[in-house]
Amino acid sequence: MNSFGTKFRVTVFGESHGKTVGVNIDGCPPGIPLTEADLLPDLARRKSGARGTTPRQETDLPQIVTGVFNGFTTGAPLTVLFENANTRSGDYSNLVVQPRPGHADRVSAEKYKGFTDYRGGGHFSGRITLGLVAAGAVAKKILKGVKVSARILEIGGCTETEKFPEVIEAALQDEDSVGGIIECVAEGCRPGWGEPFFNSVESLIGHAVFSVPAVKGIEFGAGFRAARMRGSEHNDPIVDAAGTTATNHAGGINGGIANGNPIVFRVAVKPTSSIGAPQRTFNRETGKVEELVVHGRHDACIALRIPVIIEAVTAIVLADLALLHA
Amino acid sequence: MNSFGTKFRVTVFGESHGKTVGVNIDGCPPGIPLTEADLLPDLARRKSGARGTTPRQETDLPQIVTGVFNGFTTGAPLTVLFENANTRSGDYSNLVVQPRPGHADRVSAEKYKGFTDYRGGGHFSGRITLGLVAAGAVAKKILKGVKVSARILEIGGCTETEKFPEVIEAALQDEDSVGGIIECVAEGCRPGWGEPFFNSVESLIGHAVFSVPAVKGIEFGAGFRAARMRGSEHNDPIVDAAGTTATNHAGGINGGIANGNPIVFRVAVKPTSSIGAPQRTFNRETGKVEELVVHGRHDACIALRIPVIIEAVTAIVLADLALLHA
Amino acid sequence: MNSFGTKFRVTVFGESHGKTVGVNIDGCPPGIPLTEADLLPDLARRKSGARGTTPRQETDLPQIVTGVFNGFTTGAPLTVLFENANTRSGDYSNLVVQPRPGHADRVSAEKYKGFTDYRGGGHFSGRITLGLVAAGAVAKKILKGVKVSARILEIGGCTETEKFPEVIEAALQDEDSVGGIIECVAEGCRPGWGEPFFNSVESLIGHAVFSVPAVKGIEFGAGFRAARMRGSEHNDPIVDAAGTTATNHAGGINGGIANGNPIVFRVAVKPTSSIGAPQRTFNRETGKVEELVVHGRHDACIALRIPVIIEAVTAIVLADLALLHA
Amino acid sequence: MNSFGTKFRVTVFGESHGKTVGVNIDGCPPGIPLTEADLLPDLARRKSGARGTTPRQETDLPQIVTGVFNGFTTGAPLTVLFENANTRSGDYSNLVVQPRPGHADRVSAEKYKGFTDYRGGGHFSGRITLGLVAAGAVAKKILKGVKVSARILEIGGCTETEKFPEVIEAALQDEDSVGGIIECVAEGCRPGWGEPFFNSVESLIGHAVFSVPAVKGIEFGAGFRAARMRGSEHNDPIVDAAGTTATNHAGGINGGIANGNPIVFRVAVKPTSSIGAPQRTFNRETGKVEELVVHGRHDACIALRIPVIIEAVTAIVLADLALLHA
């Protein structure tokens, strides 16, 4: 299903090459100043444009069609719409016959019994994340005193920021793609947010982050490295009455509950599945494995556009927790 | 909150040193043969006993008190109870004053305003996973044709199985603890399970797995390694009409949807927080950072007991998906 | 919150005098033929036009902006929008100072701390039921073999259909309003739908029906009359292997579960709160009870427009049950 | 499913003639003094004993097995169990062949494919309401300043309290049963509780009240009588700045939102289906309509025991709203 959240609930909808993509945000408190302009900075960060991102250019202008009156949220559900304009649907029709490796083409056709909108990935498109980013911008406004920020740590295995462009350029030359690793930090979360077991902070953030297309891993604090530490090294000594810890191997979460230190996690983003280089995969008409060349406009490094989306889903989770614990 | 699932819903309850821990399982179909004996094999795998696990010995005998009639599930909610017998509550009372590093002691006291049951971790105890394992055993019975199996890949950074005992022994000698990495594979999942975005298979399994105490990371398929691959390497070529892929870097999931290949993921388990070696942490009475020595009975390597719990939460997710997609 | 349903989930949004009202429908199976034209017959039944309904005329043309491709539902969320055109917002501004008796004016101002969109009732407007009717039309398409039909039993205490116009005319002459009673019947529901206790068929239909503005009561089968019967009279004798009953005092539901006989219930609709006749109520500026004359365009008998809305919410509940029990 | 509530969530389980019935209560705030003794007064009100109630005598002693420590709730889930002792299962075995009119026997067998626990109604038994009453007693403790009280208005059509015994006696003489009408009032609810549309106060209370076995109707304020009033009569004039109304035809709810005046509703309780008098109904073995005489111990007037259950489910709804709006 396409909804998430208990008291701050986000519902996404739309297709890449349909009329509209959008988001409904229920549970937003009244009295928050909100205009379309407030959404633009985060939407701009998500946008393509850099070398290595898709040449498809969309204006991505949000329209807030419900839930705002006289410049303030009313407490009624917010709806934000984005029109799709720059679509080239001719690019995708052959993918029903020969589904792209690494894409949802095949599972989507199977799941929806052939009725899926296959154009540009349809409802599976990364374009649906526009709604997530819009909801995230609203969530950030609710989160007084909480700062959520994500940045790229690695691109294609390279950790030196200044070399990212050449890593991406090399992939582009080969009509190939690269993945990356993103780190997100949320500062200012109140100790006590989250629940033991099923609504642990890790569970909720993990749930939300894996909703973002191309994410294949998440680790909190020391994460996988923790599995190789001893307890004496991993345990974070508490150093004051506020619960500040000397280290933050726990990533700001103990027993599933925020401990007041920064929540820190890293996310693995796979390389974009859409590549121009020829690939071999099964052709349903011929019944044979054959070469496939994918045309269309794609991101060689989707990870470039993902930090703001990770921030958004994190802010959505934290806004829900903030409202639940108010 | 302590419930999880849509159509197959699991609710856990209890405290480590209270009367009872248990689980309620709603949505189990009628007509499944079920006795307490069916739960014992998985409960035995969770049990302590091996060197490196806690010396606390509990019989862990499940009592099914509702939902079964004449040896079959009725369709009404199942309730499984476990009595706590072997408790030594004297061990824990000082931890209110000087919370243990890496534990939920401090957040729990804060969240519950001093009313938390701090004995043995209370409701934060790993003992609550008894209910998860019982529910997992029921879920496995629902999952006809699906096989879920988890195993330890690493202990304390060591990947050679035969050396695990000496890694643990070394930690025990130092009154310290070690973490580990667990891999879980689910074979036989029907293509089409899961939903794009918020109920992706990764989101649901991630949510459930992070409910297990001590888990700090999860990655599907190639996971973090995928972030360092190119698309041409990562994309799994489809080789037949059934959707079988030559490689399985996607871990059996495309666009959030099961593709019919084995679902594969790895989980990072931190070293047990409870260690005997002295640690320095804040004392709320003296207002100073002071030495703390934790007495009590603990696991030097909780990862040893976790594979069956990971299987259980995975089976819980998959049983829900199987019933939702029936 | 503005969502309802488990597997077929409906989310409403919008304001009476804002840009848009609409609905999001998640969980609709793929492959259902659907165009805007399919929604028009039920939308027309909801429309004003008859003597006794508001003179506000809206085209109420639905736009399906997501979830349909090539004339069929795709399985992705449906979004249906309605533009608001014929709005006269000048009519309502004084109601903040002197809230109308029987309206949500006062509670809305209180709940939303003065940020509510008070124009035409804002999000509390009956206009939001456009989305319910659209979702109901989709739900009816899912419900193969189930027929849901509602009709007016009483207007202003009068049970003779041919006298309804004169009852309404008399109210109009007095610038007053009248209520009514509506009966809804759902035939063809599969025995076994619903759950004991919290998800009884009565609970779910009751929940949905009380979402419709102006509804103040519901009774199933013999309902309040049952409270005056003896068991020997009320019990419905089963007369065949299919479970057909000789009478239907239970309204097609035993123990919360559909028994295969027609589900029958009646709904009490209060008289429209908006009346032209002068009323006395508290003025927040003067601090006194003073006369209030409400201008604007209203329904003298909202019950005339409600049968199709009751059908819609009933179909929404039954479609969810049908999908859950598939 | 057997759970209800968002932030204060109640899960019921058990069977009439199984080992146990009980309830799990999640989301109860920490620090509420609670012992088994606190539950006894409401449980006593639910108990049989009066002429016209079942001769089955159960001690109904609650055991709180989780969630309480040192006499206070901890914030972790509460579990309350009741053992079944006085069961006579021999009474019910023939009802599989010839299901009782008005009971869940037939739908239950159908829904659960013959695996249902048919003894004493199994999970459909009124005995499950023990858990509701226990949860209601906890909810009442959370609701500071809110008073919920229910009383019988009518028994078997008779509205004179002092004649209730003779109405019931007459039914007993005929081995028959009678229904009744119950009124519930909740005073002290904060204006603003509830949501427009799907989570209206009427929707939530209606949902919960229809979970109580034998309830077939509910009306708020003037209810069905409102359908026969004019707006000028029905509208409740506001008389002060606090929103007090001169009349309370709305039953304390406008636009789905509590307005601060007492919430008032009435509930129709059907006559108990179990009667001793012979009835004619279908016999599945003979394939004919035949006489059925039901043995066993029953309530001739279940309405006598229902007021405290209606209070309980109402308090459960209001506690959830209070916590959500905190």
Image: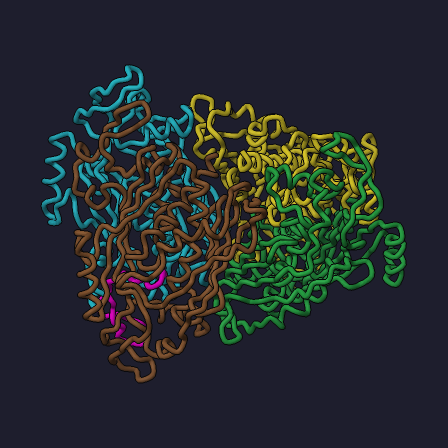
Chain colours: A brown, B cyan, C green, D yellow
Q: Residue at x 47, y 61 (%)?
A: A82
List x then y, in percent, for residue D287.
65, 65
Residue placed most toward the observer, C295 or C28: C295
- Look at the image and say whether residue B239 sits in the magenta stretch: yes
* Magenta residues, start to end: B235-256
Q: Reply yes or no: does residue D280 show up in magenta.
A: no
In the rendered structure, the answer to whether residue B118 lies left or right of residue D150 reads left
What's the magenta bit mostly, secondary-structure-wise?
A: loop
Identity of the residue drawn at 20% across and 66% down: A171
* In front of the other: B28 or D97: B28
- Is residue C204 at all visible to an observer of this figure? yes
For the residue pair A161 and C73, the one nearer the viewer reads as: A161
Q: Quadrant of residue A114?
A: bottom left
- Which residue: 88% across, 56% down? C167
**Number of marks in the rendered image:** 0
Residue reaching furthest top? Answer: B286
Residue B103: x %, y % from top left? 29, 31
